[in-house]
Structure formats: C-alpha cells, structure tokens
Amino acid sequence: MKLKNNALALDATDLKILQALQEDARQTYTAVGKRLGIAHSTVYDRIKRMEQYGIIEKYTAVIDADKAGVKNITAIMTVFTDPKESEKVAEKLRESPQVLEVYTSLSEELVIIAKVVAENQESLHAFIANSVAPLPGVLRIRTSIVTKKFKETQFLIVNDRKNLTFIKENENHNKIGESRP
Amino acid sequence: MNSRILRTLPREKAFYFFTSIGNYTGESAASLKEFLEKINVVNVKSLEFHLYRGDFEKWITEVLEDKELATEIRILRSLNYSGTILKEHLYRIVAKRHEELSGNF
C-alpha cells in the first residue's frame, strides 16, 4: 500500500485482504491475518486505510429475497437516448431507489442499461411510464422481466498484480463493492 | 372548460405509448389533438395494450378531465375490438370529440 500523487496504490497483500473480506466481512482481523500469514495489526491498519480512501465503501448484508419473503420482480431496462442527454438520464435513474444498477453502453446506439426492482408488474410499469419515459432525451425503452436467476454475485477481487489500479482519493465512481456479512 | 380539455400539458402529464409492460414506443401525446394524431402513428398493439388496461380512460378522466370522452372510450372497450377496427373506431371517437370541443371553443 503506497501513496502516489494523492492516490492509494494497492499491493498484493491489500488485494488478499479485500478478497478475504469479500468472502466473509465479519471475520476478525486476527482470522484474516492468520489466513494471510500477517499480523492482525497490519490487517487492521490496511483495512482502516482502505476505508479512509473509499476503497472499502461499506459493509452490508447479502439477502436472499426469496427466503426473506420479498416478492419483488426484477427487470432489465434498456433506455435508448439522445446522446446529448444520456448522462442526465443516467444520473436521474441513479437517484431512483427502484434502480439498482445503471450503465451506459455504446453499440449501434447509445443506450442506458438499468436493473430495476418493483413490487409487481403494475408498479414496474408505473415507474417506467411516470418516471423514465418522460425524462428529456428518452427515445424509447425496452424492458425484460427476469423470470429466473441463475447467478448473481458481487464484483470479486482478482489478486493479479497486472490488474492493480490506482484509486484516487475522493473518487466516487467505479469503486470496489462490498461483500457479505 | 373546453379550453382546459384542449390545453397542452407539461411532459410529465403527457400520455406515453407502450406496447407492453415497460416497453415504450417513443411516442407521446401532450394534448387531445396530439393524442388524436398519435392514434394513427403508433402500432395497434399499443392501442390494444392501453385500451384494455383502462389507461386511456384514466388519462382522459384524470389528466385531460374529459368525462364524456372517457365514457365513450369505456364503451369502445366493452366491444372487444382489436387491430385496425379498434384503431378506426378509436380515431373516430376521439376525432369527433376533438371537433366538438374545437368548434365550441
């Protein structure tokens, strides 16, 4: 872990710590240290530093919605936009609690892809009709309702030095997500 | 009253044409006149989708505030038309009402 131009450079040990936390964020510093063969105080220092620099954004719980009795539906929404307005549309979508993920993509046209949850088909439609279609720059929308989930995971740290990146202080985008409790 | 029904609405109050849940065609209508024009523009699937969900009646009653036209559309819904026949009937009903309101205005 080094500082370069006010940015935090992660080393292999940091990545191993992140990997361990992604598997189980509730394990103790001692357990992580034992696993990696380093002192718990080193683990503590490095975790605190990564928290401070926003590399570790938060610790959260991964919930099995089915087991929790939550009957939400999930949909993948593709929003075709006027290129001049796409950033604003994506920003607006980002503010909606129904929208879990938002991406922009350029294939033949500039599109925004968003993962949306709703209580049922009616509330999904109401959200898209009342809050997405009226946004300036929205040209058309295609929505697919998810019928079966085969896999869903968080972004996982790959401990590969070639992929090490510098993460600037106060950088808000493309941060590494957090893992399960 | 007629002028209120014929007014142009802000974009958040416009009618947005979908073909099914979440699938927006890109067509919208911000007034009764524009709604009439769009009946001939949008795919008939969109008209069927909205008519049988009661979306037209709801928008015409709650946003345009035209109970008479909403009643006409409710009657049309009860006839279970589809395809071109539905499109023609809907156009005729809305055109007639638009003409009445514009004439009296």
Image (tube, rainbow, N blue to C red):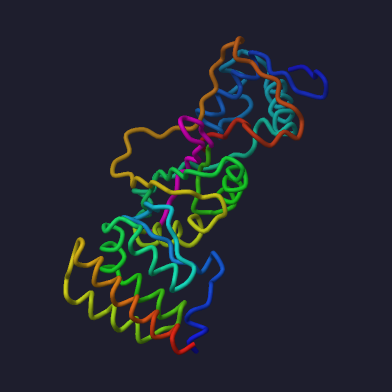
Q: How many marks?
A: 0
Residue shown at the point (56%, 15%) measured from the top left: A159
Q: Position of residue B70 (x, y in %)?
A: 34, 81
Quarter of the picture containing the N terminus of chain A is top right
Say above or below: B55 vs A70: below
Q: Position of residue A140 (x, y in %)?
A: 44, 49
* Residue A114 belongs to magenta span: yes
Q: Position of residue A33 (x, y in %)?
A: 62, 20
A18 on left or right of B28: right
Residue shown at the point (40%, 34%) measured from the top left: A152
* Residue A97 belongs to magenta span: no
B11 on left or right of B43: right
Question: What secondary structure do most residues of the magenta stretch adopt?
Answer: strand
Quarter holding residue A8: top right
Identify which residue, A28 or A131, lies in the foreground. A131
Say above or below: A181 vs A23: below
Q: Position of residue A133 (x, y in %)?
A: 48, 56
Identify which residue, A17 or A26, lies in the foreground. A17
A45 on left or right of B30: right
Chain part drawn in magenta: A104-119
Residue B20 showing in the rendered view: no
Residue shown at the point (40%, 77%) measured from the top left: B60
Q: Residue furthest right?
A: A5
Q: Residue furthest top?
A: A162
Residue shown at the point (77%, 17%) measured from the top left: A2
Residue A95 showing in the rendered view: yes
Identify which residue, A23 or A175, lies in the foreground. A175
Quarter holding residue A56: top right
B68 on left or right of A17: left
Say above or below: A82 vs A72: above
